[in-house]
Amino acid sequence: MIEFRAVTKRFEDGTIAVDELDLVVEAGTITVFVGPSGCGKTTSLRMVNRMIDSTSGTILVDGKDVMSVDPPTLRLGIGYVIQQAGLFPHRTVLDNVATVPLLSGWDRKRARTRAAELLETVGLDSGFAKRYPAQLSGGQQQRVGVARALAADPPVLLMDEPFSAVDPIVREGLQDELLRLQGELGKTIVFVTHDIDEALKLGDRVAVFREGGHLAQYAKPAELLSAPANDFVASFAGRDRGYRTLTFLRADVPVREVTTATLGSTVTSNGWVLAVDENRRPVGWLSPVDGATEVTADKLISGGSLYDGSSLRAALDAALSSPSALGVTVDPDGAVVGVVQADDVLKALATARAAGEVPS
Protein backbone atom coordinates (compact mmCIF):
# COMPACT_ATOMS: atom_id res chain seq x y z
CA MET A 1 0.00 0.00 0.00
CA ILE A 2 1.12 3.55 -0.76
CA GLU A 3 -0.16 6.49 1.29
CA PHE A 4 0.13 10.19 0.54
CA ARG A 5 -0.54 12.26 3.65
CA ALA A 6 -0.86 16.01 3.05
CA VAL A 7 2.02 15.83 0.56
CA THR A 8 3.15 19.11 -1.00
CA LYS A 9 5.94 19.82 -3.46
CA ARG A 10 7.04 23.42 -3.84
CA PHE A 11 9.97 24.19 -6.15
CA GLU A 12 12.58 26.86 -5.47
CA ASP A 13 10.87 29.38 -7.75
CA GLY A 14 7.72 29.11 -5.63
CA THR A 15 5.79 26.89 -8.05
CA ILE A 16 3.53 24.44 -6.26
CA ALA A 17 3.57 21.21 -8.26
CA VAL A 18 1.56 19.15 -5.76
CA ASP A 19 -0.71 20.71 -3.16
CA GLU A 20 -1.71 18.85 0.03
CA LEU A 21 -2.21 15.48 -1.64
CA ASP A 22 -4.10 12.90 0.42
CA LEU A 23 -4.50 9.57 -1.33
CA VAL A 24 -4.21 5.83 -0.62
CA VAL A 25 -3.16 3.31 -3.27
CA GLU A 26 -4.43 -0.08 -2.17
CA ALA A 27 -2.05 -3.05 -2.35
CA GLY A 28 -2.39 -5.24 -5.41
CA THR A 29 -4.27 -2.66 -7.49
CA ILE A 30 -3.56 -0.34 -10.41
CA THR A 31 -4.07 3.33 -9.61
CA VAL A 32 -3.83 5.72 -12.54
CA PHE A 33 -2.84 9.38 -12.17
CA VAL A 34 -4.34 11.34 -15.06
CA GLY A 35 -4.64 15.01 -15.92
CA PRO A 36 -3.36 17.77 -18.21
CA SER A 37 0.31 18.71 -18.54
CA GLY A 38 1.73 20.43 -15.48
CA CYS A 39 -0.87 19.15 -13.03
CA GLY A 40 1.58 17.32 -10.75
CA LYS A 41 0.84 13.72 -11.64
CA THR A 42 4.42 12.81 -12.61
CA THR A 43 5.84 14.74 -9.67
CA SER A 44 3.56 12.78 -7.35
CA LEU A 45 4.77 9.52 -8.88
CA ARG A 46 8.44 10.44 -8.65
CA MET A 47 8.13 11.38 -4.99
CA VAL A 48 7.30 7.75 -4.19
CA ASN A 49 10.80 6.53 -5.14
CA ARG A 50 12.45 9.83 -4.17
CA MET A 51 13.46 10.84 -7.65
CA ILE A 52 11.96 14.03 -6.26
CA ASP A 53 11.65 14.74 -2.52
CA SER A 54 8.48 16.25 -1.12
CA THR A 55 8.55 19.65 0.55
CA SER A 56 6.16 18.60 3.29
CA GLY A 57 3.84 15.79 4.21
CA THR A 58 4.50 12.05 4.36
CA ILE A 59 4.60 9.24 1.82
CA LEU A 60 4.42 5.71 3.19
CA VAL A 61 5.15 2.52 1.26
CA ASP A 62 3.87 -0.51 3.17
CA GLY A 63 3.76 1.64 6.28
CA LYS A 64 7.33 2.95 6.03
CA ASP A 65 8.16 6.61 5.45
CA VAL A 66 10.14 6.82 2.20
CA MET A 67 12.20 9.68 3.65
CA SER A 68 13.63 7.24 6.22
CA VAL A 69 15.12 5.04 3.49
CA ASP A 70 18.29 5.74 1.54
CA PRO A 71 17.15 6.57 -2.05
CA PRO A 72 19.23 3.88 -3.86
CA THR A 73 18.03 1.24 -1.40
CA LEU A 74 14.44 2.44 -1.76
CA ARG A 75 14.59 2.26 -5.58
CA LEU A 76 15.88 -1.31 -5.58
CA GLY A 77 12.52 -2.34 -4.12
CA ILE A 78 10.38 -0.28 -6.51
CA GLY A 79 10.09 -1.06 -10.22
CA TYR A 80 10.18 1.98 -12.51
CA VAL A 81 9.12 2.16 -16.17
CA ILE A 82 9.42 5.36 -18.19
CA GLN A 83 8.19 6.57 -21.57
CA GLN A 84 11.20 5.62 -23.72
CA ALA A 85 12.00 2.41 -21.78
CA GLY A 86 15.40 3.85 -20.76
CA LEU A 87 17.35 0.77 -21.82
CA PHE A 88 21.14 0.69 -21.82
CA PRO A 89 22.00 0.80 -25.55
CA HIS A 90 25.27 -1.18 -25.31
CA ARG A 91 23.84 -4.04 -23.24
CA THR A 92 21.88 -6.94 -24.64
CA VAL A 93 18.19 -7.32 -23.85
CA LEU A 94 19.00 -10.11 -21.39
CA ASP A 95 21.61 -8.04 -19.57
CA ASN A 96 19.28 -5.02 -19.48
CA VAL A 97 16.67 -7.07 -17.65
CA ALA A 98 19.27 -8.60 -15.33
CA THR A 99 20.58 -5.18 -14.23
CA VAL A 100 18.52 -4.69 -11.06
CA PRO A 101 18.94 -8.24 -9.72
CA LEU A 102 22.72 -7.87 -10.17
CA LEU A 103 22.65 -4.56 -8.30
CA SER A 104 20.64 -6.30 -5.58
CA GLY A 105 23.43 -8.82 -5.07
CA TRP A 106 22.21 -11.75 -7.17
CA ASP A 107 24.88 -13.86 -8.87
CA ARG A 108 25.07 -13.53 -12.65
CA LYS A 109 23.62 -16.97 -13.44
CA ARG A 110 20.58 -16.46 -11.23
CA ALA A 111 20.02 -12.94 -12.56
CA ARG A 112 20.17 -14.07 -16.19
CA THR A 113 17.87 -17.01 -15.52
CA ARG A 114 15.35 -14.64 -13.97
CA ALA A 115 15.75 -12.26 -16.93
CA ALA A 116 15.09 -15.04 -19.44
CA GLU A 117 11.94 -16.07 -17.54
CA LEU A 118 10.64 -12.51 -17.53
CA LEU A 119 11.22 -12.01 -21.24
CA GLU A 120 8.84 -14.90 -21.85
CA THR A 121 6.42 -13.48 -19.28
CA VAL A 122 6.16 -10.19 -21.19
CA GLY A 123 5.74 -11.98 -24.53
CA LEU A 124 9.27 -11.99 -25.93
CA ASP A 125 10.79 -15.35 -26.86
CA SER A 126 14.38 -16.41 -26.24
CA GLY A 127 15.44 -15.10 -29.63
CA PHE A 128 15.34 -11.55 -28.29
CA ALA A 129 17.80 -12.19 -25.43
CA LYS A 130 20.98 -11.44 -27.41
CA ARG A 131 19.60 -8.47 -29.32
CA TYR A 132 20.38 -4.85 -28.50
CA PRO A 133 17.73 -2.14 -27.87
CA ALA A 134 18.32 -0.54 -31.29
CA GLN A 135 17.27 -3.83 -32.90
CA LEU A 136 13.85 -3.74 -31.26
CA SER A 137 10.63 -1.93 -32.15
CA GLY A 138 9.23 0.65 -29.74
CA GLY A 139 6.68 -1.80 -28.39
CA GLN A 140 9.32 -4.48 -27.86
CA GLN A 141 11.54 -2.01 -26.02
CA GLN A 142 8.67 -1.15 -23.68
CA ARG A 143 8.14 -4.85 -22.96
CA VAL A 144 11.82 -5.12 -22.04
CA GLY A 145 11.41 -2.06 -19.82
CA VAL A 146 8.53 -3.71 -17.99
CA ALA A 147 10.51 -6.95 -17.63
CA ARG A 148 13.46 -5.05 -16.18
CA ALA A 149 11.21 -3.28 -13.68
CA LEU A 150 9.86 -6.65 -12.55
CA ALA A 151 13.22 -8.41 -12.43
CA ALA A 152 13.83 -8.16 -8.68
CA ASP A 153 10.15 -8.94 -8.00
CA PRO A 154 9.35 -5.56 -6.39
CA PRO A 155 5.96 -5.21 -4.66
CA VAL A 156 5.52 -1.71 -6.14
CA LEU A 157 5.70 -0.70 -9.79
CA LEU A 158 5.76 2.94 -10.96
CA MET A 159 4.95 3.60 -14.62
CA ASP A 160 5.38 7.09 -16.05
CA GLU A 161 3.51 7.36 -19.37
CA PRO A 162 5.19 4.12 -20.53
CA PHE A 163 3.06 3.58 -23.65
CA SER A 164 2.65 7.12 -24.96
CA ALA A 165 5.51 6.94 -27.49
CA VAL A 166 4.14 3.98 -29.48
CA ASP A 167 1.41 3.80 -32.12
CA PRO A 168 -2.22 3.15 -31.08
CA ILE A 169 -2.28 -0.51 -32.12
CA VAL A 170 0.92 -1.35 -30.22
CA ARG A 171 -0.30 0.74 -27.30
CA GLU A 172 -3.51 -1.25 -27.00
CA GLY A 173 -1.52 -4.47 -27.06
CA LEU A 174 0.78 -3.22 -24.29
CA GLN A 175 -2.20 -2.19 -22.19
CA ASP A 176 -3.72 -5.65 -22.57
CA GLU A 177 -0.37 -7.20 -21.68
CA LEU A 178 -0.12 -5.09 -18.52
CA LEU A 179 -3.59 -6.17 -17.42
CA ARG A 180 -2.68 -9.80 -18.07
CA LEU A 181 0.52 -9.48 -16.07
CA GLN A 182 -1.28 -7.76 -13.22
CA GLY A 183 -3.78 -10.61 -13.14
CA GLU A 184 -0.87 -13.00 -12.61
CA LEU A 185 1.42 -10.92 -10.38
CA GLY A 186 -0.88 -8.65 -8.34
CA LYS A 187 1.59 -5.77 -7.97
CA THR A 188 0.78 -2.38 -6.47
CA ILE A 189 0.99 -0.17 -9.56
CA VAL A 190 0.89 3.59 -9.96
CA PHE A 191 0.50 4.51 -13.63
CA VAL A 192 0.73 8.05 -15.03
CA THR A 193 -0.99 9.06 -18.28
CA HIS A 194 -2.61 12.08 -19.90
CA ASP A 195 -5.05 9.82 -21.79
CA ILE A 196 -8.42 9.41 -20.06
CA ASP A 197 -9.29 6.31 -22.11
CA GLU A 198 -6.07 4.63 -21.01
CA ALA A 199 -6.79 5.60 -17.41
CA LEU A 200 -10.31 4.17 -17.53
CA LYS A 201 -9.14 0.94 -19.13
CA LEU A 202 -6.25 0.22 -16.78
CA GLY A 203 -7.20 1.71 -13.46
CA ASP A 204 -8.89 -0.02 -10.56
CA ARG A 205 -9.10 3.56 -9.32
CA VAL A 206 -8.32 6.81 -11.14
CA ALA A 207 -6.95 10.01 -9.63
CA VAL A 208 -7.75 13.08 -11.73
CA PHE A 209 -5.35 15.97 -11.15
CA ARG A 210 -5.91 19.55 -12.19
CA GLU A 211 -3.62 22.57 -12.61
CA GLY A 212 -1.84 23.63 -9.45
CA GLY A 213 -1.32 20.08 -8.25
CA HIS A 214 -4.82 19.65 -6.86
CA LEU A 215 -6.53 16.28 -6.70
CA ALA A 216 -9.90 16.86 -8.36
CA GLN A 217 -11.37 13.37 -7.84
CA TYR A 218 -10.23 9.89 -6.82
CA ALA A 219 -12.68 7.16 -7.73
CA LYS A 220 -13.35 3.93 -9.59
CA PRO A 221 -13.61 4.45 -13.37
CA ALA A 222 -17.38 3.85 -13.54
CA GLU A 223 -18.00 6.33 -10.72
CA LEU A 224 -15.75 8.89 -12.36
CA LEU A 225 -17.87 8.75 -15.50
CA SER A 226 -21.29 8.53 -13.88
CA ALA A 227 -20.73 10.97 -11.01
CA PRO A 228 -17.91 13.46 -11.76
CA ALA A 229 -17.08 15.54 -8.70
CA ASN A 230 -17.06 18.87 -10.55
CA ASP A 231 -17.12 20.54 -13.94
CA PHE A 232 -13.38 20.04 -14.45
CA VAL A 233 -13.64 16.27 -14.08
CA ALA A 234 -16.75 16.16 -16.27
CA SER A 235 -14.94 18.15 -18.96
CA PHE A 236 -11.76 16.11 -18.73
CA ALA A 237 -13.69 12.85 -18.97
CA GLY A 238 -15.15 14.13 -22.23
CA ARG A 239 -18.57 14.83 -23.67
CA ASP A 240 -19.01 11.17 -24.57
CA ARG A 241 -18.56 9.94 -20.99
CA GLY A 242 -22.06 8.47 -21.12
CA TYR A 243 -20.91 6.22 -23.95
CA ARG A 244 -17.73 5.35 -22.04
CA THR A 245 -19.87 4.27 -19.09
CA LEU A 246 -21.02 1.34 -21.21
CA THR A 247 -17.50 -0.08 -20.81
CA PHE A 248 -18.40 -1.07 -17.27
CA LEU A 249 -21.82 -2.55 -18.02
CA ARG A 250 -22.47 -6.11 -19.10
CA ALA A 251 -25.93 -7.25 -20.12
CA ASP A 252 -27.46 -9.95 -22.28
CA VAL A 253 -27.53 -8.90 -25.94
CA PRO A 254 -29.20 -11.27 -28.41
CA VAL A 255 -26.68 -12.92 -30.72
CA ARG A 256 -28.29 -13.48 -34.09
CA GLU A 257 -27.36 -15.84 -36.89
CA VAL A 258 -25.38 -14.57 -39.86
CA THR A 259 -24.68 -15.98 -43.31
CA THR A 260 -21.02 -16.98 -43.60
CA ALA A 261 -18.86 -18.23 -46.43
CA THR A 262 -15.22 -19.16 -46.88
CA LEU A 263 -12.89 -17.53 -49.39
CA GLY A 264 -13.18 -19.17 -52.78
CA SER A 265 -16.70 -20.42 -52.25
CA THR A 266 -19.72 -19.27 -54.25
CA VAL A 267 -22.73 -17.73 -52.51
CA THR A 268 -26.18 -16.62 -53.53
CA SER A 269 -27.62 -14.05 -51.15
CA ASN A 270 -29.43 -10.73 -51.31
CA GLY A 271 -28.04 -9.77 -47.91
CA TRP A 272 -24.64 -9.22 -46.32
CA VAL A 273 -22.34 -12.26 -46.16
CA LEU A 274 -19.53 -12.59 -43.61
CA ALA A 275 -16.40 -14.18 -45.04
CA VAL A 276 -14.48 -16.43 -42.66
CA ASP A 277 -11.26 -18.44 -42.78
CA GLU A 278 -10.89 -22.16 -42.20
CA ASN A 279 -11.10 -21.56 -38.42
CA ARG A 280 -14.26 -19.45 -38.77
CA ARG A 281 -12.40 -16.27 -37.94
CA PRO A 282 -13.89 -13.22 -39.73
CA VAL A 283 -11.95 -11.77 -42.66
CA GLY A 284 -14.46 -9.24 -44.07
CA TRP A 285 -17.92 -8.57 -45.43
CA LEU A 286 -19.33 -9.22 -48.89
CA SER A 287 -21.97 -6.61 -49.72
CA PRO A 288 -25.40 -7.70 -51.01
CA VAL A 289 -25.33 -8.84 -54.65
CA ASP A 290 -27.79 -10.22 -57.16
CA GLY A 291 -27.22 -13.82 -58.22
CA ALA A 292 -24.33 -16.13 -57.47
CA THR A 293 -20.87 -14.67 -56.78
CA GLU A 294 -17.49 -16.01 -55.75
CA VAL A 295 -16.13 -14.83 -52.40
CA THR A 296 -12.71 -13.33 -53.13
CA ALA A 297 -10.46 -11.09 -51.04
CA ASP A 298 -10.73 -8.15 -53.46
CA LYS A 299 -14.52 -8.01 -52.99
CA LEU A 300 -14.42 -7.85 -49.20
CA ILE A 301 -15.05 -4.79 -47.00
CA SER A 302 -13.32 -4.44 -43.63
CA GLY A 303 -15.59 -5.61 -40.83
CA GLY A 304 -14.98 -3.10 -38.03
CA SER A 305 -14.39 -4.06 -34.40
CA LEU A 306 -15.34 -7.40 -32.87
CA TYR A 307 -17.57 -8.14 -29.88
CA ASP A 308 -16.26 -10.68 -27.39
CA GLY A 309 -19.01 -10.34 -24.80
CA SER A 310 -16.93 -7.99 -22.65
CA SER A 311 -19.25 -4.98 -22.35
CA LEU A 312 -22.16 -3.08 -23.88
CA ARG A 313 -19.69 -0.54 -25.21
CA ALA A 314 -17.87 -3.27 -27.16
CA ALA A 315 -21.19 -4.58 -28.50
CA LEU A 316 -22.39 -1.15 -29.61
CA ASP A 317 -19.04 -0.24 -31.13
CA ALA A 318 -18.98 -3.49 -33.11
CA ALA A 319 -22.43 -2.79 -34.53
CA LEU A 320 -21.74 0.87 -35.31
CA SER A 321 -18.34 0.24 -36.91
CA SER A 322 -19.54 -2.58 -39.15
CA PRO A 323 -20.41 -1.73 -42.79
CA SER A 324 -23.35 -4.11 -42.49
CA ALA A 325 -24.54 -2.61 -39.16
CA LEU A 326 -24.09 -6.12 -37.77
CA GLY A 327 -21.48 -6.43 -35.03
CA VAL A 328 -19.50 -9.63 -35.37
CA THR A 329 -19.49 -11.66 -32.15
CA VAL A 330 -16.58 -14.02 -31.55
CA ASP A 331 -15.64 -16.68 -29.01
CA PRO A 332 -12.34 -16.71 -27.03
CA ASP A 333 -10.59 -18.30 -30.01
CA GLY A 334 -11.79 -15.54 -32.35
CA ALA A 335 -14.28 -17.74 -34.20
CA VAL A 336 -17.61 -16.26 -35.31
CA VAL A 337 -20.64 -17.17 -33.19
CA GLY A 338 -23.09 -14.65 -34.66
CA VAL A 339 -23.82 -10.94 -34.82
CA VAL A 340 -25.35 -8.21 -32.64
CA GLN A 341 -27.45 -5.23 -33.72
CA ALA A 342 -27.33 -1.70 -32.32
CA ASP A 343 -31.08 -1.73 -31.59
CA ASP A 344 -30.64 -4.83 -29.44
CA VAL A 345 -27.76 -3.21 -27.55
CA LEU A 346 -29.87 -0.14 -26.79
CA LYS A 347 -32.73 -2.35 -25.59
CA ALA A 348 -30.30 -4.17 -23.29
CA LEU A 349 -29.13 -0.80 -21.97
CA ALA A 350 -32.72 0.29 -21.32
CA THR A 351 -33.34 -2.95 -19.42
CA ALA A 352 -30.20 -2.39 -17.33
CA ARG A 353 -31.27 1.17 -16.54
CA ALA A 354 -34.73 0.00 -15.49
CA ALA A 355 -33.06 -2.52 -13.18
CA GLY A 356 -30.95 0.26 -11.66
CA GLU A 357 -27.66 -1.17 -12.87
CA VAL A 358 -26.50 2.10 -14.47
CA PRO A 359 -27.22 5.75 -13.70
CA SER A 360 -30.10 7.35 -15.60
Image: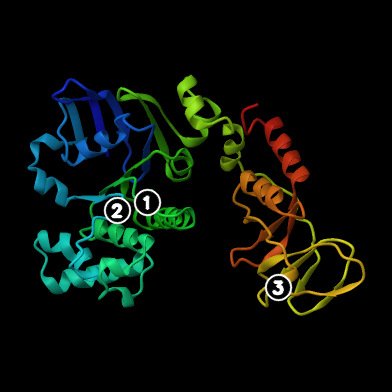
> Of residues 25 and 99, which is closer to you in this image?
99
Q: Which mark is residue 297?
A: 3
Q: Which mark is residue 84?
A: 2
C-alpha gap between disc 1 and disc 2 = 7 Å
Residue 92: image location, x then y, percent: 21, 70
Judged left or right of residue 290, residue 77 is left
* First along the sequence among labels 3 and 2: 2
The answer to whether the residue labelled 1 contacts the one labelled 2, judged by CB atoms less than 8 Å apart, is yes
> Of residues 147 and 182, which is closer to you in this image?
147
- How packed is label 2: few (under 14 Cα within 10 Å), some, or many (20 or more)? some
Vertical order, 153 against 72 (above or below): below
- How packed is label 1: few (under 14 Cα within 10 Å), some, or many (20 or more)? some
Vertical order, 234 against 192 (above or below): above
The answer to whether the residue labelled 1 contacts the one labelled 3, judged by CB atoms less than 8 Å apart, is no
Q: Spot the residue most to the right.
A: 291
Image quarter of the N terminus: top left
Q: Which mark is residue 83?
A: none
Residue 73: image location, x then y, percent: 10, 48
Image quarter of the C terminus: top right
Vertical order, 334 against 305 (above or below): below
Which quadrant would residue 346 be assigned to in this image?
A: top right
Kind of residue sitting beneath label 2? Gln
Q: Spot the residue most to the bottom.
A: 264
Kind of residue sitting beneath label 1? Ala
